[in-house]
Amino acid sequence: MSIFHMPGSFFSSLNLPVSLFLAGVLIALVYLGMCYQLWYIPAFLLGLFLVNQLVKRLGMVWAGVISLLLYCWGLVETYSAYLDTTSLLKGYQLYSNLFFTARNGFFYTPIFIYMGYYLFDHFHSQNFRVHRWQKVALTFGFLCLEGVVIFQHEGMDKNFFFLLPFVTVYLVNACLKSSFLKSYDLQYLKQMSMALYFSHPIFIEWARYGFSNLPLSYPDRGKLIFVVALFGSHLFGLAMLSYHNWQNEKRVRRIKKEVF
């Protein structure tokens, strides 16, 4: 099964007429990402552009307010079970019929990008200096309570959590200031994350294709696919890191040989 089957299956699932194929390619590249978590790439780029323009033209305060309001629009899908028969839910349903989801660079990512900017500007402020891990634990506790409320009812989807941006910014702040983490060289995690991010859809599709004929229930097949994709992508990442290190060592030896 070719890795190019993934975008191919994506387009076949849309049942687009040939006349709209180029438009479908454009939407996939700049909006949907074509496969699994690859939606994050166009979402990040659009969100980065949007936040930069808001900060430049309106300042940090209004940029934060607008980013939060945009994120709250996505919360409608998460809390849809509690908004039944309301005009707000009807408006979101009209939106989702055209744009599928609010999990994109316009509604989802701006608040997280803004939080990064805010943390950078206030990194040494009192809010981020004292009781760092306590604030992580407190916000995470409230996030868990929010999850209990949300998952009591099915709703439309579960991409947006109100407390998630706050947990994220406090967690990043605590990790950056942690003396424990500073004692370790974690640079390799950046390279590993790239390998995992771009390779995991391949292993998901391979596993799905390979296990399609097994007499398993849908949840059990999903668990098996998850395990295979998890270990497969990690082994691939380790192999890529080993190859990268081997290439660097080879380059260093060649330079030393030329010098001496």
Image (cartoon, rainbow, N blue to C red):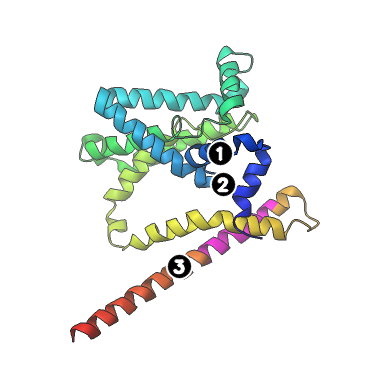
Q: Can you say which quadrant of the picture contains the N terminus?
A: bottom right
Element carrying mark 3: helix
Q: Residue at x 50, y 32 (%)?
A: 160
Query: What residue range appears in magenta?
Result: 222-235
Query: Sequence-wise, which precedes: disc 3 or disc 2?
Result: 2
Q: Residue furthest right?
A: 215
Residue under label 2: 35
- Residue 56, given in percent of the width and then of the height, sits at 25, 28
Give the labeled residue for mark 1.
22
Is residue 215 something that shows in the picture?
Answer: yes
List the residue tagged with mark 3: 240
Residue 134: image location, x then y, percent: 35, 41
Prevailing SS of the magenta stretch: helix
Could you give the CA–CA distance between mark 3 and mark 1, rounded to whole angstroms? Answer: 34 Å
Label 1 – label 2 distance at C-alpha: 17 Å
Three-letter amino acid code at disc 1?
Leu
Q: Nearer the viewer, residue 87 or 25?
A: 25
- Direction from residue 11 to residue 219 in the image, left or right: right
